[in-house]
Amino acid sequence: MKRQNTILGIAALLSVFTLNSNAQVGQPFIHDPSTIVKCDGKYYTFGTGGGGLISEDGWNWHSGAQRPGGGAAPDAMKVGDRYLIVYGSTGGGLGGGHAGRINTMWNTTLDPQSPDFKFTEAVEIASSEIDEDCDAIDPSVLLDPTTGRMWVSYGTYYGFIRIVEIDPKTGERVKGNVAKDIAIDCEASALIYRNGWYYLLGTHGTCCDGVNSTYNIVVGRSRNVLGPYLDNVGRDMLKGGGRMVIAAGDRKTGAGHFGRYVEEEGVEKMSFHWEADYDQGGRSVLAIRPLLWKNDWPYAGELFKEGTYEIESERRGYALELAVDFVRQQGGRGMFGGGATAGPQAIEEQSLIDVYEKWPKDNIDVRIGDYMFRPHQKWTVTAVPEAGGYLGGQYYKITIAGTKRALAATADREVITVPQYTGAAEQLWRIEQLTDGTYRIMPKEVPGCDEELVLMSSGDSTPSLGKFDFSSDNYKWNFRNH
């Protein structure tokens, strides 16, 4: 963190709802959030000043997380059965000049209501002095899965980003370790590892200026944790390089303080803050996006948006549809040779009113087939705010466009449509973008089943429910807005 000196009426309301429907709800107000950590079924993130946020579901957030020491821009990680917190106690103008200290401390729980909640005494692992070309602030911690060694990066725009090694058992700096410069022209760095690459994410731009903050997140990568970290065109981050991961958008400015959360293979989230959310009075808020990967580079994914879609199976490209008789449409036979005297006339698409009365009135099965932009293939996806959510998202109902007929999971691990959406848990759907840009679609509950199952294509024309497998296209879907 760097401190710097009638129908129209209904339509209007709907537009406001759509605008805000993808924001974290509750009181997600935080600056410089740590990587999100899960403890005893709840999610925690810590911010500048000593406090932080807690969420029971990953969507509704409220204050209540606690840590001693104050200071700025902490990071958090679970190591074994303990939780490590690393934070900057001064620096970045908070304590005057460039003087700063990086500290670590441990706890066996993050729940401030637990009788076991007690942080250890802080241990200093790095520092900077008034006239130094580095500010000891904005730390991030990495436990290298290949070696078991632990590293902390830190620093701001006032000088270099540096890296030091600490002991993953004690949180103390490894004896004799010398800090190494790895980047410049950024702050709020983060270290992550994936697929043989070490990644350094830095926050570029200016902060702490509300809607005028220019924060954005950039990245470089290296085969060595000590660098050099190069961007997509070979620029060294030690010389100001960095490829964009996310910048301003959706009426929000100042993306900063990256954190990575891996739910399982193929399902990753990135956390950060927006310096200013225009729809929250310009306050700094927690944000969570899908984390995508392409050619071993990280990208910020998109939050799912309500709308009417073709739901396309990645398996073959066929579309999810009602299992109803195909109703032929009039007109449009191709002309072979000449003979036509009039110009071509536009053909209207088949409408719901043309076919609806021919459909059964009770439950209707679903299948997968060639997409023909017919009414039985158009699905409207609508957020259900009162249903709660999951990490970075909320639940949706999926209905045939123009009707109340809703997609539902069944006790025999199949999917059907019911005539009327009722709000039952088996009619609520979790829609998450995967690391390759496709989506998984998961019912909130499957009646009589404790397992987490997702919508799958068990055959080219057969949808079902099954255990998610990222390596198989059977479990992946796309939403096409035609």
Image: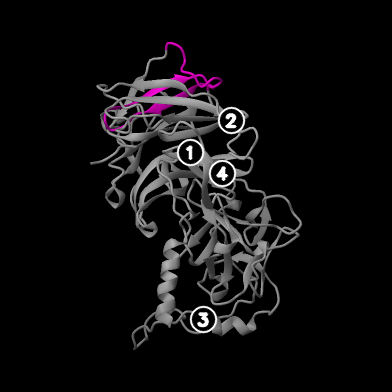
Q: Nearer the viewer, residue 87 or 335?
A: 87
Q: Residues within 10 Å of mark 1 (few under 14, many from 20)?
A: many
Amino acid type of the residue tagged 3 in the rendering:
Ser
Q: CA distance from mark 4 to mark 3?
A: 46 Å
Amino acid type of the residue tagged 1 in the rendering:
Thr
Q: Is residue 481 above or below residue 190?
A: below
Mark 3 and mark 4 in contact (Cβ < 8 Å)? no
Amino acid type of the residue tagged 2 in the rendering:
Lys
Horizontal and vertical percent position of residue 264: 58, 41
Q: Could you say whether the residue bearing mark 4 is in a helix, strand or loop? A: strand
Q: CA distance from mark 1 to mark 2?
A: 20 Å
| Magenta-highlighted residues | 147-176
Q: Which numbered dot is residue 43?
A: 4
The residue identified by callout 3 is: 351
The residue identified by callout 2 is: 118
State the residue lying farthest toward the bottom: 341
Horizontal and vertical percent position of residue 240: 26, 33
Please identify, in this view, whether the residue under mark 2 or under mark 4 is nearer the observer: 2
The residue identified by callout 1 is: 35
Q: Residue visible at 36% across and 21% down?
A: 127
Would you say residue 462 sits in the magenta stretch? Answer: no
Amino acid type of the residue tagged 4 in the rendering:
Tyr
Please identify, in this view, whether the residue under mark 3 or under mark 2 is nearer the observer: 2
Mark 1 and mark 3 in contact (Cβ < 8 Å)? no
Q: Nearer the viewer, residue 465 or 10?
A: 10
